[in-house]
Amino acid sequence: MLDTTKDKAYLVPVSQTYQMQQSIKDFEKNFVTAKDREYEDKTYFEMKQVIAKSLGTAKARRKLESLVQNKVEDEAETGGAQSKRLRK
């Protein structure tokens, strides 16, 4: 609580706390385009690839290409007996 006459703030015990979040009415309907929705299902790595291909420098594209070539897959993805292996 703020006491403006004494310029002091006091802490008051409360039983519950609330969190409010601002939102814009009909934001989704008015501002989100089909192109924005196109990227909703992509992973972080896929989004990084899209950005590097469209806006990235040659160095960034080479680095991303190197990451793709040397990507390590987990056992769950490959279904193999090895725990990890390099994809070629």
Image (tube, helix red, strand yellow):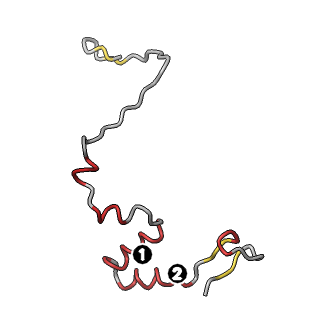
Check disc 2: other Cα within 10 Å, few if <14, some if 14-19, many if 20+: some
Asked whether the beta carbons under mark 2 and mark 1 sit within 8 Å of each other, the answer is: yes
Quarter assignment of residue 57: bottom left
Q: Name the residue under label 1.
A: 49
Q: Where is residue 61 in the image (x, y as percent from the top left)?
A: 40, 82
Residue at image location 25% in from the left, 44% down from the top = 26
Residue 68, numbered label: 2
Looking at the rendered structure, the secondary structure element under dot 2 is: helix
Q: Is residue 16 above or below residue 37?
A: above
Looking at the rendered structure, the secondary structure element under dot 1 is: helix
The residue sitting at the left extreme is 30
Q: Which amino acid does label 2 sit on?
A: Val
Q: Position of residue 34 (x, y in %)?
A: 29, 63
Q: What residue type is labelled 1?
A: Gln
Which comes sooner in the sequence, label 2 or label 1?
1
Q: Say whether residue 45 is left or right of residue 50.
A: right
Q: Say whether residue 86 is left or right of residue 49.
A: right
